[in-house]
Image: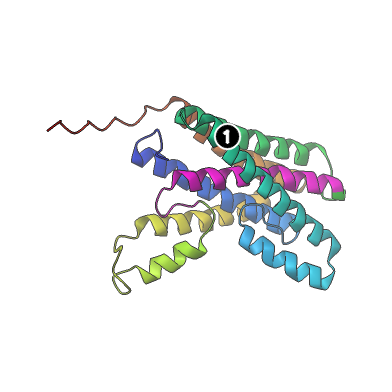
Amino acid sequence: MRSPLDERTTVATLLVLTFTAGLIDAVCFLRLGHVFVANMTGNVVFLGVNAANTAGRILLGSSVSLAAYMLGALAGGRLWRFLRHRPRAWHTAVWGSHGFLLLAAALLAWTAPFREQLWLASVFIALLAVGFGMQNATVRIMGVADLTTTVLTATITQLASESRFGTGARPKPWRKIASISMIVLGAGVGALLLRVFAVGSATAGVTAVAAALVTGVALVYAFAPTRAEEPEPAAG
């Protein structure tokens, strides 16, 4: 499904969302112990490893993340079914909901000792994972080439195999490079911000930054000019 915005604006918003995925996964990995909420491939691997090692707390976190992510992906698909004829409303609803979930997680991290209480940590993980499930479902429906916002295994494979030194099918790889770079940058900034913010508010602060970024994306889709309609071909 085409984005209601022009190509440059669409690509820019997807790169912001890619940065956000790296930012939040870095926080969850470093603060919650080997748990991802955006990149499910690593999460499934940790799920198997922790099940074999009977690491109960981490196993629970990975399980909650996977289940919540799937719920979010389901919600993303349902939103598209309800709003597929109104693309601007669809995007605004998805990114607005994602931003709200991130904000709720930030408030939880700010007000409650969630790292010490297992059920609160599970709620925090679930809030984040639902949002990223919605994000990935929406981006998949959009189908913008080379910009998945989280899943980089295929992107890295294509970057090498389709380069001029490989098949040569797609010799201009800037989107792939930008996508990989934004995940790396987001993870690095997330790790750095955990050091900058005070210890008690670090997780909340980084999550609030992510909430602001995703809310910004929602506002862009709500108010930015729509793409120009392509002229219909002349009859005959």
Left or right: 150 with respect to 88?
right
Camera-nearest residue between 87 and 58: 87
Numbered-mark total: 1
Q: Magenta stretch?
A: 119-148
In the rendered image, residue 150, in percent from the top left (x then y), is placed at: 54, 54
Q: Residue furthest left?
A: 236
The chief SS type of the magenta part is helix
Q: In the image, what residue type sits under mark 1? A: Leu
The residue under label 1 is 79
- The picture quadrant where one finds residue 232 is top left
What residue is drawn where x is 33% and y is 32%?
Answer: 227
In the rendered image, residue 88, in percent from the top left (x then y), is placed at: 46, 29
The quadrant of the rendering that contains the C terminus is top left
In the rendered image, residue 71, in percent from the top left (x then y), is placed at: 68, 45
Residue 139 in magenta? yes
Left or right: 93 with respect to 195?
left
